[in-house]
Amino acid sequence: MDEDDEHMMQIKIQAIKKLNVWFRSSNGIINRIFTQKAPVFGLVIVALIIFIAIAASVIAPNDPLKVNMSMRLEGPSSLYWLGTDNLGRCIASRLIWGARMSLIYSLCVLGLMMVISIPIGLLSGYAGGRVDTFIMRVTDIFLSLPTFLMALAIAGTLGPSAKNMIIAMASVWWSSYARIIRGMAMQMKQQDFILAAKAAACTHSQIIFRHILRNIASPIIIMATLEIGSIILAIASFSFIGLGAQPPTPEWGIMLSDSKEFIQTQPQLMIYPGIAIIITVMAFNLLGEGLKNAIQD
Amino acid sequence: MKKKCIWAVIVSALSLVLLISGCISNQVLNDTQNGTSGSSVATDMDDSNQFDSITIMVSGMMNPEDASPIESSTEMCLYEMVYEPLVKYGKGGVIEPGLAERWEINDNGTQYTFYLREDVKFSDGTSFNADSVVSSAKRWEPTKFSTPLTNVEKLDDYTVRLTFKENCYPVIIELTYPRPFRIASENSFDTNGNFVKMIGTGEWMVESYIPEEEVVMAPNPYYYGTKPSIKKITIRKVTDGGSRIMALQSREADLSLADLPSESKSIIESSKYLAVKNTEGTMGFFLMLNQENKILQDKNVRLALNYAIDKNSIVDNILGGDGVVAKGILPDTVPYVTDENSKGYSYNPEKAKELLAESGYMDTDGDGIVDKNGVPLSLTLVFQSEEYAAWKPMCEYLQAATKDVGIDIRLEQRDISAYYDAIWKNRNFDMIIYRTYEDSWNPHGFLRSMFYRAESGMSVCWYDSQLNKYLDEVIKTQDESTRQAKYDQIFKLINDEALIVTLCCPDKQYAYNTRLQNVTVAPTTYEGIEWQRITIAK
């Protein structure tokens, strides 16, 4: 019993320490982020986008799927804030719902990617030896392939749909994360407290999940934030070429490809979703960069 | 980390470029309209736009090395330029002399004797005679005619007789098809009978090509008819409608045989050097329904789909007014189609709802979609937007329109080859948007291709034993009024049973640069334009 208590104590101390890393008033990560301007800017926009995404059904002035042929290609008005597209749908509503779709899809991709890469990376890093060599050669194969092209090929074979796009992207992009996570796991493995945990007769799964995973969780979160920007971009690209979300889903990439025909006559149809993509991707990248700098310092 | 920044920069740079390029092309347009900067445009012109050569655009496949006269999926305009038929399909379906100066049909209608022109040579210089016809005809698939071709004989050097099993009226029309009954040189094939090269007797021959990109055509030096005044036609494959418009604007191309997005109409209208030839087409857009689907086997559902669609709105808003509402499966420009036999269905969503309710479809869970036994009425609609840019908005409109009566449509966009595989091979669709064939194929060839089922095999669109019987009978009917009566029965059956969902019939439009003069629309859309008549303004 004593041993267990002591063990619990240790974990609590670790947890507090970790919280301190994030929030310690003078030198915490959060604090360091707030001293930089660009990441704060990114954070504000990201927060705004997340708010828009969550409250899409309340904010959007119209049903994004409502086709109204008598109101096609109208200019901005109080009912249609940004006007209507070629089928008389409200552009503003589609953009707002598009934020939700982009975030949902990218979180799905990210989640699936982590589900694949975390166990593989941890196993590889913790086990070492032949298991490690084998897993790393497999990830090498994946890393040597051009990822976007490979994802295109997979999505093309599976057939065009949002689900298949998510599967295709995650199944190609996981490899570099597995490798990073493996590196972090290896580093952790050599720490003294792991040795202590071993001495305290913790099982392998306890060590992996309680000690290693918890300690590398925050870098993983940052890595994920860094990645959301490029994932959103990739999702829009997939939808643009017709392999991702299917019409009439209000998705930015689809809106772009729908308005291709109008680039000369109604360029605003293309500009609005384009700007939405740029702002979102930039905000996530700024935030991710800030987080990274703050941690490295 | 820098990478992410670079991405952001690239994206913004790209969008800027897009914006700016849009502005620039408008500027050039405006400048030339004001006549201020003609010189900058002149320098923009590339070699293909000299005074004796033109560039045209198509959207289909461009594979001359695979363009066998018998079977291929290469664009028909290439066939029309290179290979010639024994008889030609003229304006309004009149059969005109082609390689045969005249022809005779025996009394029981099974033997066709063709008297060939004596002044014809293939583009490789070899002469054309009865042997050429016999060797070509031997390669034809005998069963591809309405009635099997049983014998081909040479009567003398310039006389050939084709014998068919039965007396079927469309045989002479089928001989006009761009494929698969045209005459190619013996040298088009290697010793094993494999196709190697396009060699025909037509006005043009293939000079050089890059597969799936462009084909350069030069006049056939041995052509017997009037020589064209242009010396080179470059046929370029451009799959995107917007790109085709831009190529016309920048004068990279002179004419588009492929469909142009209706949204770009204003661009062409406002341009001083672009014009459009508009003709009534013989083509209709429709939804093919999958007979295997249990839901669609219910006639009420098929009727409801027809009633749910406001075709006037499609024509006005999606085609930009350049077309007509489809009543029957084929437009009334096609022989044997009358108002009486193709009544069509007008827009009536209330009636659609009633019909669905009659079949037991009710919205029990309040999600706006009707269901029956707990299964919602949900169907997939497959489409592609490479050949017809209007199909995408049209399908999105259909989705919204059918939702109003409680039918859920899931859209699936496919690339062009997967789309055709769905129709001809794997049948992986509930509904698919398709177009009718054109000109010489209408109505008998198209109807048989869609609805007819031989002993083995399937019928592509829908199988109905009664319809099958009619289709068999009609081609053997010689008397004109009985034939009309038979076609009445056929069109009525398709209409009354709602075997398809009719949509609209777009006009055929060719946008071209006004430096081309005498642009004349050919009798068939496969031929497109009468190239030999075109002259170029100096």
Image (tube, coloured by chain):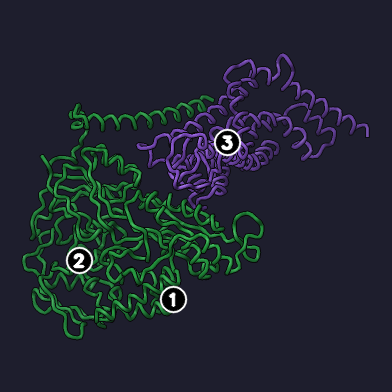
**Marks 2, 3: nearer the viewer:** 2
In the image, residue A102 lies at what x, y percent? 56, 38
Structural distance between the alpha carbons of marks 2 and 3: 63 Å
Structural distance between the alpha carbons of marks 3 and 1: 57 Å
**Is B234 positioned to the left or the right of B474 in the image?**
left
Nearer-the-camera pick, A250 or B195: A250
Nearer-the-camera pick, A196 or A32: A32
Q: Secondary structure at mark 3?
A: helix
**Is A180 positioned to the left or the right of B100 in the image?**
right
Is B267 above or below relative to A291?
below
Q: Quadrant of residue B504?
A: bottom left
Residues at circles 2 and 1 in contact by the CB criterion of under 8 Å: no
User: Which residue, given by chain and number where applicable, does mark 1 sit on?
Assistant: B464
Q: Quadrant of residue A271?
A: top left
| Image colour assigned to chain B | green
Chain that the image shows in purple: A
Q: Residue at x 77, y 39 (%)?
A: A204
| Residue type at numbered disc 1 | Asp
**Marks 3, 1: nearer the viewer:** 1
Mark 3, other Cα within 10 Å: few <14 / some 14–19 / many ≥20: some
Q: Residue at x 58, y 69 (%)?
A: B359
The answer as to whether the residues below labels 2 and 1 share one chain is yes
Q: Residue furthest left?
A: B119
User: Which residue, given by chain and number where applicable, does mark 2 sit on?
Assistant: B89
Is B176 above or below relative to A205?
below
**Label drawn at residue A176:** 3
Location of the C terminus of chain B by quadrant is top left
